Amino acid sequence: MARTTRSKASASTAATSETKSTPSNTKSRYTLPTESTNPPKLFILPTSATKDAKIVSLLNPRYTKPTRYLVCPETGIYEFTRIAAPKATPRSWLIECGNTGKVEEKTSEDGAELGAYITKGADLYVATLIDPLFLILPAFAAQSANTKDEKRMFISSDDHLDSIREKSPHLSEILRWGNIRTLLESRMAAICDTAEAGDETMFRFNEDKLLTEVLSKAQKMSEQSLPKSMEEKFVTKALEAPVVGMKRENTTTLSISQTEAQVQSETPASTSTVSTPKPESVESQSSALSTGTAPSLVSEVSTAATSVVEESITTTTTAAELTPSLGASPEITTLQRLRTAFNFICSCYIAPSQVTRLQTKLKEQKPPPIDFTPLDNYLEEISKLRQELAAARSVGDYSRKRVLDEEELADRAEKKRRKEEEEKRKKAGESKGVRDLKKVNTVGMKKMSDFFKKK
Amino acid sequence: MLEARLEQAQILKKVVDSIKDLVQDCNFDCNDSGIALQAMDNSHVALVSMMLKAEGFSPYRCDRNIALGVNLVSLTKVLRAAQNEDILTLKAEDAPDSLNLVFESSENDRISEYDLKLMDIDQEHLGIPETEYAATISMPSAEFRRICTDLMAMSESVTIDATKDGVKFSCNGDIGNGAVTLRSHQNVDKPELNIDIELTEPVGLTFSLKYLVNFCKAQALSSTVKICLSNEVPLLVEYGLSGSSYLRFYLAPKIGDEE
């Protein structure tokens, strides 16, 4: 249900546009009406929300400043997402408020001219359900920052919420509505240890519970596939192994996966003899990227690290027959997806200080709620590969050269210097006239050897 | 072993001066008939050919053919130390790595001696056939130089049209166009001012003025210059030296570029 609404003039924070009167000295026959001080905004509101739903200001858990939410006494709390056209392609709404459109709360200033509007921006606000859990998180921010779990006290929900009542203008108000209080308290219970004290429930913030809660949300989010742009940027890209122009006999493109297999194979591999691929079997696959540097690097540098990589690569290519384009196993992809979802939730709804605590908890908790080690190993492997590739490329020499050591570098500098000197000397032996003649336009002039034959 | 004594150092000075802006390094090929030089500019569209006959020296001795590879800028530096009227002697071993130059002042008993390091220059030699040119123009070298420098102010190339009426140097540039026409002209008192046009058939060719102006640096060598043109062959600009020695410049015509 799309509705146009006008925020009341008193809620001036929402009215973003300023009054701009049209210049009075225009000679045009048509004058534009003055810009509205309180232009209508477009919202998409949930049909489930009842008539009593109101837009209120509550504390944003991430940015700790009041933000607008739609609160329905029965169905819950909704957050707004603004959908705006990019600056490069400006759009506007043409809003007709005649028979079809229904403008609520007609005020006197809307008056008779209320017919149609053209808005400056094509913003659209979409209200979606938000877990009230996040809205009460700021109440625990102070506690989570400096006290240990044991030292926290069981206190009533009201006392918890008192700490944010000041910054959250309409919180006390909505607590009186319908079942908002029960809703908040039930969600509070999800992240707190509770204790019954008489007829009142007391709450004590429990970070582990919060972590479980967030993780389960992340899991849910990652189970359905992530939005495409997100999937591409944070999952596919992050897991992409650099293309190494390496081909061995009949193996296809390098594909690293199954980090476990790698990890296990690393130890024996480093001790075993490094079989250097023969130059004939080495074919660069993506010319621009690797142009043979990578195989040469792998084959010639005999440092332990490289040989490990090389061997592990081969083990995986042979051990796990995977499609060449996909480097990571489904398991790793799932983990990465989960991590992306977790980070996304954290970055949207949880204050930075709490996020860091959550992340350390996620790492340190024993046993870990989710084991990210395979993913970490895999990412480490990729970054190592990338570094090596970058190093190989920075050599800038596409012949089969090793990484330059200092001696070679000095040699090169010396050669360069000598070349420059020679050039200088050559310049000195060149008269100004000869230099000038080089600039002369000789188009259409044949070479002397075209006229006179060599002796 | 080479030993060549020039009565006047200025001949070599002027020769080197007039080609050093065209050529950077070149070989002086010495044999018993004299000292020859053939070199092209960097773009290979112009060629300079010099011949200093043995008769121009006194004495001249060259037992074996020797190529003296010289950087002309360096040679200019050494020759700057010689006065125009000095007696200049060139000496070199059979397989030299340096050229010995001695300048003797006849007025006072000053003798200066220089050794110039030589270099190996790999140069190709072109055979230049004797050509019957369609038009041969002799004129004062100063006149030719003036025409070239005047027209250069207007354009980068000049069209030389030789007809039975005379020879016309015309150019067309961004700021406008210009032309200088010369007719055959005999000056009994000063034969060096004669303008002589020999024509077997009319010719019209276009040349780069930058190169022509460059050739004109040899004006100091001779009061007259001979310009020879034929269709489809390079222009020849020849400065005669004493005896049958000469300094010749060849320049490829501009074809299909009528700007």
Image (cartoon, helix red, strand yellow):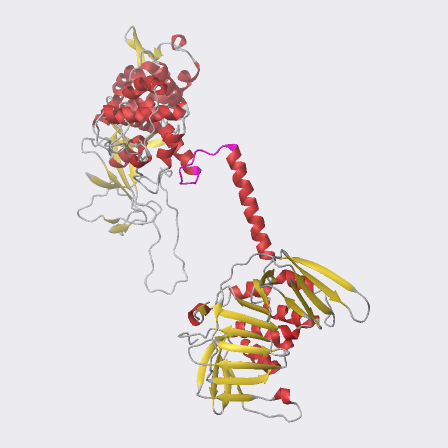
Q: Name above or below for residue A397 compared with residue B147.
A: above
**Could you tell me residue B126's position as x and y percent?**
48, 68
Q: Where the N terminus of chain B falls, by quadrant?
A: bottom right
Specify the farthest residue to the front: B63
Q: Name above or below for residue B3 compared with residue A205.
A: below
Pick whichever, B227 or B254, lies toward us.
B227
Pick whichever, A217 or B224, lies toward us.
B224
Residue A14 quadrant: top left
**Could you tell me residue A153's position as x and y percent?**
38, 9
**Could you tell me residue A34's position as x and y percent?**
35, 53
Pick whichever, B65 or A214, lies toward us.
B65
Q: Name above or below for residue A211 compared with residue A310.
A: above
Residue A370 quadrant: top left
Pick whichever, A378 or B35, lies toward us.
B35
Q: In this view of the protein, can residue A166 be seen by the observer?
A: no
- Is A172 magenta? The answer is no
Tell me if A56 is positioned left or right of B234 in this view: left
Specify the farthest residue to the right: B108
Q: Name above or below for residue A360 compared with residue B91.
A: above
Q: Main secondary structure of the magenta part?
A: loop
Q: Which residue is located at x 77 percent, y 64 percent?
A: B111
Tell me if B103 is positioned left or right of A257 in this view: right
Q: Which residue is located at x 49 percent, y 63 percent?
A: B124
Q: Where the C terminus of chain B falls, by quadrant?
A: bottom left
**Could you tell me residue B121's position as x and y percent?**
54, 58
Magenta highlight range: A394-406
Q: In this view of the protein, can residue A6 be seen by the observer?
A: yes
